[in-house]
Amino acid sequence: MGTNVQKLNGIAFLPFQEQSEMLISELNRRFNFCEKPSNRYGDLIYFENKQSFLEASSGEFPYWARTTMKDPFILTFDSIGDAANYLKSLQRNWAPYQYNFYRRAQLIQEKLPYINLKERKFPVKIPASPIGLYTLIDEHTLIASAETTSFLPAGNLTFIEDHENPPSRAYLKIQESLTMAALLNDVELPHQGQECFEAGACPGGWTWVLVGLGAKVHAVDRAELAPELMKNPLVKFQAHDAFTLKPQDLGKKDWVFSDVICYPERLLKWINEWLESGLTDNMICTIKMQGDIDWPLIKEFASIPDSKVVHLNYNKHELTWIWNRK
C-alpha cells in the first residue's frame, strides 16, 4: 500500500461557516486557551498541543466548532485508491472538508462507503454513527481524524429551503434544533396529539414548522402571526408578554419553545420556572447574546441536568439550549 502515516499530537477545529473569529474568541475567553494556531487549512484550525487544550478546557469542546478532529494524523499516499483504502481500514464513515483540490477529494469520497452529503428534507433522522473527517492539503497529502465530536458529515446540517410558505427564515433554526434533539437525546419530534407553547412566536416561523408536524401550538407574542397561521385551527394565539405568563396558568405542554430576543439572565429564570413546575417534558430555547458572551452564565445553562447547549448551522451570535426529560 502506497501510504505513510504521521501521528500528530495536536487537535484541529472546523468552525461554522464565517465563524472563525467567534471560535478563536471562545477558545480564548471560555477556556483561557490563548495559544496561536500552528497551521490553518482553509477554515480548519490546527493547534500543536492537544494536551494543553484538554487541560484548559477540562475535556469540553468549543460550541463554535461544528466538528473537532480529536486524534488527527497526516496521511501521504500515492493514489486515490490508497488514500480511500487506508481511511476505510480505520472505520466506515468519512466526510470531507475541502478548501482546494475539490475534484481529487470527490474522487476519494467516491471510493469510500456512501454517506449523504446533500441538503436534507425535513423531517430527517440522522444516525448516531461515528464519522471521520479528512482534508486534502495537497494532491498526495491529507490531514484526517477518525474520531470527531459530531455525527454529522463535517459537522454540517443544512436543509432544502422552502422560499414560498414559511413566514420567516427562522423556521430553519427550529428544524435543525429538533433534528439535533432527536439525534442527541433520542426523542420523537412534536406530533399530532401533542401541545406546544411558543414564546415570542411572531411572525410564526417556528409555529409553521410545529403545525406542519401536526402539533397544536399556543403561540404568544405582542404582535400577531402571519395571517395564514392566525387562521390555522391548530394555532391558539394570545397577545401577551410570554415571559410574564406562569406555567401553572398555561397547564401541561409537551414542548416549550423560545426564540425571544432577551437577556440570557431573563431566559434562564424563565426556563427554571418551567422546569420547577414539572409541566413540560421538552424545551428548546435560543440564547441570544447581548454583546460579549457571559461564559459563566452559559455554563449555568449547560449545567442543567439532561440539557445540552449547542451552536447550530443556522445560529449566528447565539446558542441553542435543548432539554428533554429522561
Image (cartoon, rainbow, N blue to C red):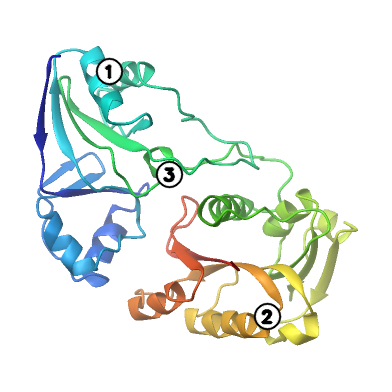
Q: Nearer the viewer, mark 1 or mark 3?
A: 3
Tell me the residue that label 2 is attached to.
Answer: 278
Please provide percent x and percent y for residue 165: 74, 44
Q: How many marks?
A: 3
Q: Secondary structure at mark 3?
A: loop
Q: Residue placed at 13% from the left, 49% from the top?
A: 10
For the point 49% across and 70% down, which residue is it?
288
Q: Amino acid at mark 2?
A: Gly
Classify 142 as above or below 282. above
Q: Earlier in the sequence, mark 1 or mark 3?
A: 1
Cα–Cα gap, marks 2 and 3: 31 Å
Can residue 291 be spotted in the picture? yes
Q: Residues within 10 Å of mark 3 (few under 14, many from 20)?
A: some
Q: Secondary structure at mark 2?
A: loop
Q: Which mark is residue 3?
A: none
Is residue 250 shown above or below 148?
A: below
**Location of residue 161 in the rendering, given as x and y in whole percent from the top left corner:** 61, 39
Q: Secondary structure at mark 1?
A: helix
Callout 1 crowding tier (Cα within 10 Å): few <14, some 14–19, many ≥20 = some
Q: Is residue 247 left or right of residue 156?
A: right
Q: Amino acid at mark 1?
A: Arg
Q: Are marks 1 and 3 in contact (CB under 8 Å)?
A: no
| Residue beneath the point at 15% across and 14% down | 1
Work out whether residue 33 can be spotted.
no
Give the distance between the C-alpha atoms of the residues marked 2 and 1, in whole angstroms. Answer: 54 Å
* Residue named by callout 3: 151
Task: Identify the residue position indicated by label 1 in the image.
Answer: 104
Sequence-first tag of 2 and 1: 1
